[in-house]
Amino acid sequence: MYQKMLLCLFGLFCCLMIRAQGVMASPEYIQELTSNWHGERFADGRPKVSDALLMRLKKIQIEEAWGYLRSKGYHNQYEGGWQIVHPDNIMTGRVVTAQYMPLRPDYQKLVKLKGGRENRDTIGGSNSWPIEILKTGDVYVADGYGRIIDGTLIGSNLGNAIYTNSKNGVIFDGGVRDLAGLLDIEGFNGWFRGEDPSYLQEEMLTSINAPIRIGRATVLPGDVVLANRHGIIFIPAHLVDQLVLSSEVVGLRDLFGFQRLREKKYTPGQIDTKWTDAIQADFRDWINTYPNEKLPMARKELEDYLNNAQKQ
């Protein structure tokens, strides 16, 4: 009897959870997904990585970011093979995710119903829903399962709306239309699989701010994006600060190494392998005379990092 009561209560709990599941993930669920983050959050639960870190991240090389993540056990955070609206520009930002699937009428009806309960616009297309929640610094990242023909998630109208809300751009594992119009949106950028004049059809939005897959990368809401002509890295929010600092130190070590090679003080073999204590000491002396205004980080931040590294 007791076991039957427990089963009934469990079943009721599951039903309530299913009923409560909406199109957009709850703040509580997003906090569970990103529990390693201990800083400020948006009202929707996503980690709020600082604008200052996003700016510093723009100077980090894809290979350096990839290497750092691999050293922390994150082996599936890179995806390449993109077409880019403005290939010479770099984009960083905080991720808002969206999942798209081939249209299924009964499921689409449920999505529309739940969207209505969330006070979303059910008259227009649901592909506008993620755009409506974008904040400054966000990047709209959508899994469109690589569909280009009839899978064009935005054209110039929605592109303008995206830039108005986020002052940023998009990453679409899918297509776009009206690329000429998107090119005219000053400040907007986008990574996508292809362009086509067709409209979005036989495709539907199924979730917002849930985990998605972009190529070979797993992406969570609140991840931070580093995107350039060499590909895209999706960085867990709790790793961004140390990734940036570690990569900046690597950049300084490279500058030191290049200078010493030009001076012929060391051989390429000495610089390209583990440094001796003498080279390490030379690097510290070089750093001590490096102008503060040229450092990508605060002097104390650099000293703390180097001292901690020396102890390890």
Image (cartoon, grey):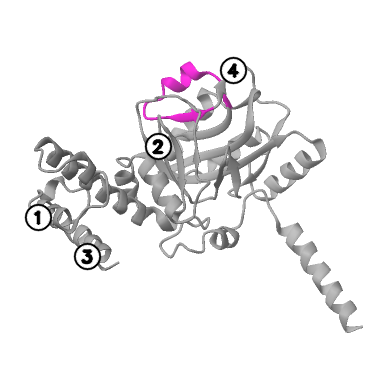
Which badge, 3 or 2, is on the more N-terminal residue?
Answer: 2
Please give the count of numbered marks on the rendered protein: 4
Instruction: Give left or right: position of 267 versus 142.
Output: left
Q: Which residue is mark 3?
A: 307
State the residue in front, 143 or 156: 143
**What secondary structure is marked by label 2?**
loop
Q: Crowding at label 1, few (<14), some or many (≥20) Cα neighbours within 10 Å?
A: few
**Alpha carbon separation for disc pair 1 and 2:** 42 Å
Q: Cβ–Cβ below 8 Å for labels 1 and 2?
A: no
Q: Which residues are magenta?
A: 175-192
Q: Give the label, 4 or 3, closer to the camera.
A: 3
Mark 4 or mark 2: name the one nearer the start of the chain: 2
Mark 2 residue type: Lys
> In this orientation, does residue 213 appear?
yes
Query: Within 10 Å of the Cα at label 4, are there few (<14), some (14-19), or many (20+) other Cα atoms?
Result: some
**Quarter containing the C terminus:** bottom left
Q: Which residue is mark 1?
A: 285
Where residue 13 sits: x, y (%)? 77, 68
The residue at 41%/20% (across/down) is 184
Name the secondary structure under disc 3. Answer: helix
- The label shown at residue 167 is 2
| Earlier residue among tags 4 and 3 | 4
Of the residues shown, which amino acid type is indicated by label 3?
Asn
Distance from the alpha carbon under mark 4 to that under mark 3:
54 Å
